[in-house]
Image: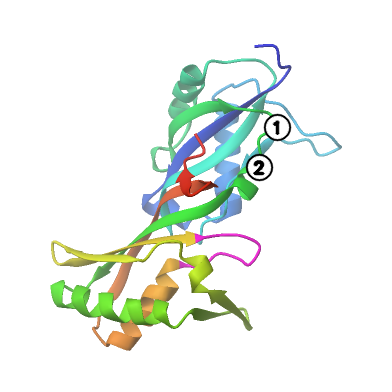
Amino acid sequence: MADEHFRLRVAHAKSGRLRFLSHLELTRACERSVRRARLPFSVTQGFNQRIKMAFGPALPVGTASTAEYYDVWLDSYVPAEEALARLTGATPELVGPAEAAFVPLRAPSLAAALTIARYEVILEGGERAADVLESELGAVVADGTFAVEHKGKSKVFDLARTLPKEPQVRSVEGRVVVEMTTRMGEHGSLRPDALVVAAIERSRSGATVMSVTRTGLFIEDGDGFRTPI
């Protein structure tokens, strides 16, 4: 490889009790893993030099994930398989890496490229709640817009733009599972549980949200989506 530097993209999890890490705490944990893995990382310019890394969209505190990403720039080439093995041994299992691959140095940033997120919301409520919730969630989406209050400010989402696919509701072993795909961008990111809670309130089903997991991050590519690795 003739490039002077190399851009390694790593996919990793955020699960268990570590789902309560803030985005800043998560980035620091990843930086420490890169150091412990003894990868030949590049550093930023300036007085306060840091590992040259970039991260994907932040997760809300408490939301788990099976598909988070970061890029780390290397000064010399290490095979992706070896880098992954080193990182696996140097990273806590609950935020451990699952995949690694090199991407072009001039590829768009993760924050700019990753505009589609897929989530799984699990609720306690039973099969009847699934039927009722599916109907009410459809009614919420049919309203066309959804307002969210955050820190005293109101943000209104255009659901036709924000939801590229219809939410799917099913019952699994006495629990309700909602699969939702959202679009992120300059207008912000809609928390899937906010939409689900609105549907619960309308349905009066008594269901409660047990967990929220981001199960995929994607790049929009023509009429479809593709993973960043």
Pointer 2 residue: 109
Q: Which corner quadrant of the image does residue 142 belong to?
A: bottom left
Tag 1's secondary structure? Answer: loop
Q: Most prominent secondary structure in the magenta stretch?
A: loop
Q: Which mark is residue 106?
A: 1
* Left or right of residue 128: residue 24: right
Q: Residue at x 71, y 21 (%)?
A: 5
Tag 2's secondary structure? Answer: loop
Q: Which corner quadrant of the image does residue 45 belong to?
A: top right
Foreground: 15 or 200?
200
Foreground: 86 or 53?
53
Q: Residue at x 42, y 43 (%)?
A: 13
The residue most toward the right is 47
- 184 drawn magenta: yes
How far separated are the C-alphas under marks 1 and 2? 9 Å
* Left or right of residue 64: residue 203: left
- Residue 191 position within the rendered picture, expressed as x and y whole percent measured from the top left: 48, 67
Q: Residue at x 58, y 47 (%)?
A: 56
Inspect the image, locate mark 2, and give the three-letter code of the amino acid beneath it: Ser
The magenta region covers 183-191
Foreground: 190 or 162?
162
Q: Quadrant of the N terminus?
A: top right
Residue 140 position (above or below residue 22): below
